[in-house]
Amino acid sequence: MTRLIVATVCLTAATLMADTKPLIIAHRGASDQAPENTLAAAELAWRQQADGIEGDFYLTADGHIVCIHDKTTQRTTGIDRRVDRSTLAELQALDAGAFKGPQYVGQRIPTLDQWLDTAPSEGLFILEVKSGPELIAPLKTRLAARPALRQRIRIISFNDAVIRESKRLLPDIPAWLLISYKQNKETGTWTPTLQQMLDKLKACGADGLDTHANPQVITPAFVAALRQAGYALHCWTINDPAAARQFAELGFDSITTNRPAEMRRALTK
């Protein structure tokens, strides 16, 4: 309870500071300092005045939604288990914090509800769906039990089908398509092109674009085209103050960062 009171105070201050965009979204929580996608990372992000926290979500074998980035638990727990083939009890028996330092020993892979329970009085929850569209129906059930948080939820995914299913089952919740880019080494061109991206956003019914912050792709003309088409505009993952200021000047709605406190300072100077 004490931690939530502290987080509420910090978030109120952050909200006052963030009347102008971009909002600062903590990538997997404050993952530069705390173990990613754990409650420690979420709580630290709120204390560091993030405007929202982003987490990654999979379905377990027994139908729970858990917060973890990889398909397996190897990287963050040292034990190799497929998330979708493991039960919640099996996953939460693992230590998901020790890899970051002894002070985090005992951190567990949290459920969606535990992640949402870190909520201060304000702030966004950006839910990246790592499973396929089959996660959306159980997500709808979980959010139905938490109506007060519903307007603070955003759904993101690289998977077009996830965005389509989200807009079908949760039409009131904004859904942003994640896009990254590849460069042809021979021609120097980047894909997807702007037009391909616009076509993709329209086809899946996305409300916005959450793009890799690639300065070779993201230009004022790029931003203008997305705005003219009516899309919200977000970017990831920025940990450099100069880059944060650059994308703020381009007019992005939010930037996602592993270092929310540092980016807050950079954008409020």
Image (cartoon, rainbow, N blue to C red):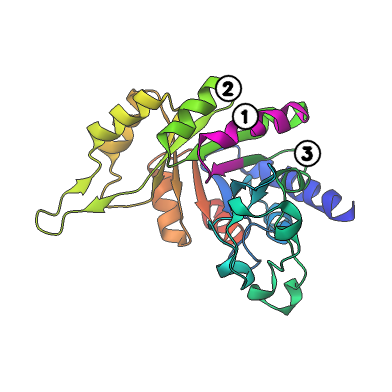
Q: Position of residue 36 (x, y in %)?
A: 62, 61
Closer to viewer: mark 2 or mark 1: 1
What amino acid is found at the position of numbered circle 1 in the picture? Ala
Q: Nearer the viewer, residue 36 or 17?
A: 36
Residue assigned mark 2: 169
Amino acid type at image mark 2: Leu
On screen, residue 4 versus residue 269, left or right, reads right
Q: Answer with the quarter of the image where residue 225 lies.
A: top left
- x and y, in percent, of residue 176 in the image: 47, 34
**Residue 249 appears left or right of 165:** left
What secondary structure is found at the residue carrying circle 3?
A: loop
- Disc 3 packing (10 Å; few <14; some 14–19; many ≥20): few
Q: Position of residue 163 (x, y in %)?
A: 47, 31
Query: Quick one: label 1, few (<14), some, or many (20+) residues within 10 Å?
Result: few
**Residue depth check, mark 3 versus mark 1: number of the one nearer the observer:** 1
Q: CA distance from mark 3 to mark 1?
A: 26 Å
**Residue 219, position in %: x, y?**
28, 43
* Label placed on residue 137: 1
Q: Secondary structure at mark 1?
A: helix
Range of residues picked out in magenta: 126-146
User: Is residue 136 a member of the stretch shown in magenta?
Assistant: yes
* Residue 265 in which image quadrant: bottom right
Residue carrying label 3: 121
